Amino acid sequence: MAALHVSDLFIYRWRYTLGYIAVGIACVVLLLVAALYIPGGLNQREIDAVASTNALSLKQFSPEMVVNLPYYLVQKGSLFLLGLSELSIKLPTIIFGFMSVVGLVLLLKIWFKSNVAILAALIGLTAGPFLLAAQSGTPDILYIFWPVWLLYFTAMISRRAAPRLLWKILFFVFAVFSLYTPLSAYVLVALASAVLLHPHLRHLTKQLSRLFITTAVVIASLIGIPLLYSVIVQPSLLLTLLGIPSSLDLSLSAYQLFTQYINVLRPTNGIIMTPVYEAASLLLVGLGMYRILTAKYTARSYVLSAWLLLLLPILILNPQMVNVTFVPFLLLTGYGIDFLIRYWYRLFPRNPYARVVGLIPIMIFITSLVLSGIDRFVYGYLYNPSGSQLSSNDLSLLKNELPHHKNSTLTLVVSNKEKAFYEAAKRFNPNWRIQYIVTDTSLLHAGTIIASHDAPSKPTLILTTVVTSASRSNADRFYVYKKTQD
C-alpha cells in the first residue's frame, strides 16, 4: 500500500482556491453586515453626503461639487433607482468596497505568493479603517478603491500582461477619475517617482507610442474637464484636493497622530476607533518596513517607499485621514507575513516537520488578528455608547410612521441642518406623500404635522403620538400633531 503524502489530500491541493473562496465569503458577509447593521442607521456625515448628492445639478453647478464627484454620481443613480433608504445610500459604498477587495486580492496575488496574499487579505478585511469606510455611505471608500486599482494596473503594465493596451487605458482613466478624490494625486506622484527612479519602469514608459500618448491625453482631458474648470474658477479648491488645511496646529496634529496610531494603552471610541491599527498589526508593519528597506532594487519597494514619504506630511496636516493609510498598511503587512514565513523556512530548509510546526504559531497569530479585528469593530460600534450614539435611525422611524397618515396632508417640521436631507427624501421617495417641509412652525398647513427632535420649535397643537427610538439616549425622535384647519 502506497504511503499517503500530504500533497495527496484534497484540502492541501485546493488550499489556495479554498482560501480565496473564504476571502470572498468573508468580504460579502462583512460588507453587508457592517454597512446595514453596525451600528445601523445614518451618521451626520452620511446625511451630509446625501444632501451633496441631491444638490448635484448642471443648472446650479458650483466648483465644490467636483470633490468626490464619481461617488456622488453613483449614489445619485442608486437613489433614483431604489429611492432614498439606508440601503440605497450605502449601496455605492458596498459596490466600491467589494471592488476594492477584488482589487486587493488581485494586487496581493501579484506582489506576494498565494499563502501571503490570502492571509494579508483576511487581515485587511477585518481592519478597522476598511470596515469603517465600508459601512459609511460617504466617499471614504474611494481612498482605498483608487490606490488599489491604480497599483494593480501598474503591476499588469509592468509585467506586460495581455491585453497590454487595455491595462494602459484603464490606468489613465482611473488616474484621472481619482483626481476628483482628495489626496489621490499623491499616489500618482509616487508612481511617477518610481518610474523616474527604476530602470525597468523607465524603459516601459519610453516604449509608449505617440498615438497612445495622444489618445490618453484626449481621454484624460475629456474626463477631467469639470475638475479643471472648477480649479480655474476656484483655485482654493486645489488645496482641498491636495489635503492642505486652511489652518494648522502642529502640537494638536502630533497629539492626534500619537493617539490614533501609537497609544495602544488608552484605546478610545468615536467616529474613529483609536488606535487605528492594533499593536500586533503594527509589529507586522514594522517587519514589512524592514523588508522593503532591504529590497530597494524592486519596483514595488520604490513605489511603496515614495508613497510612504509623501503620506507622512499629509498625515501631519490631516491626522484624521486614516483611510489613506490602509493600502500601504496592508502591503507592509503582506511584507511582514512574507518575512516571517521566509525566515522560518530558512531556519529549517529540509526539515518538513519543523516547517509545518513553525507555521502553527504564525497561523494562530494571524487568526487572532482577524478575530480581534472583527470583535473590536462590532463591540466598538454596536455596544459602546460613544460609538453607537453616532448614528440615527430617524429615516427608518419616519418611513414606518408615514403609512399611518395616508389620507392626510403631511407637513414635516425640521431644523435647518436637517432640511436638505429630508428634501432629498421627499424627492426620491414620492410615495411618502410629504407635501411640505418647513423649519418655521408659523407655516403649518391643516393635516398631520410631524416635528423632528431637532426642530427649532414644536407646534402649539394637541400631541397625538411620540415616535421613539430604542437605540438613542434622546429617544423622542418625532412628535406627531393634528391640525384641523388653517
Image (tube, rainbow, N blue to C red):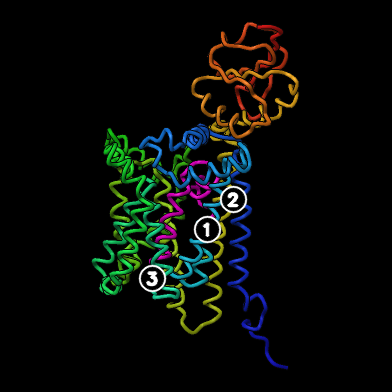
Q: Name the residue under label 1.
A: 101
Q: Mark 2 points at which residue?
A: 31
Front-lying residue, 382 or 463: 463
* Main secondary structure of the magenta stretch: helix
Q: Give percent across and percent down for residue 319.
A: 36, 41
Mark 3 secondary-structure assignment: helix
Q: Mark 3 points at which residue?
A: 157
Circle 2/circle 1 CB separation < 8 Å: yes
Residue at coordinates 43% horizontally, 38% vertically from top-left? 58
Q: Give the range drawn in magenta.
A: 125-154
Residue at coordinates 45% horizontally, 49% vertically from top-left? 142
Residue type at tag 3: Ile
Q: Give percent across and percent down for residue 315.
A: 33, 45
Residue type at tag 1: Val
The answer to if 243 sits in the magenta stretch is no
- Counting other residues with Cα less than 10 Å from the Cα at mark 3, is it few (<14), some (14-19), or many (20 or more)? many
Q: Compared to 163, does 337 lie above or below?
A: above
User: Which quadrant would the N terminus be assigned to in this image?
Assistant: bottom right
Marks 2/1: CA–CA distance: 10 Å
Circle 3/circle 1 CB separation < 8 Å: no
Q: Give percent across and percent down for residue 175.
A: 37, 56
Is 208 on the left or on the right of 445, as rendered? left
Q: Which mark is residue 307?
A: none
Q: Compared to 260, does 455 lie above or below?
A: above
Mark 1 secondary-structure assignment: helix
Mark 2 secondary-structure assignment: helix
- Name which of mark 2 and mark 1 comes first in the sequence: 2
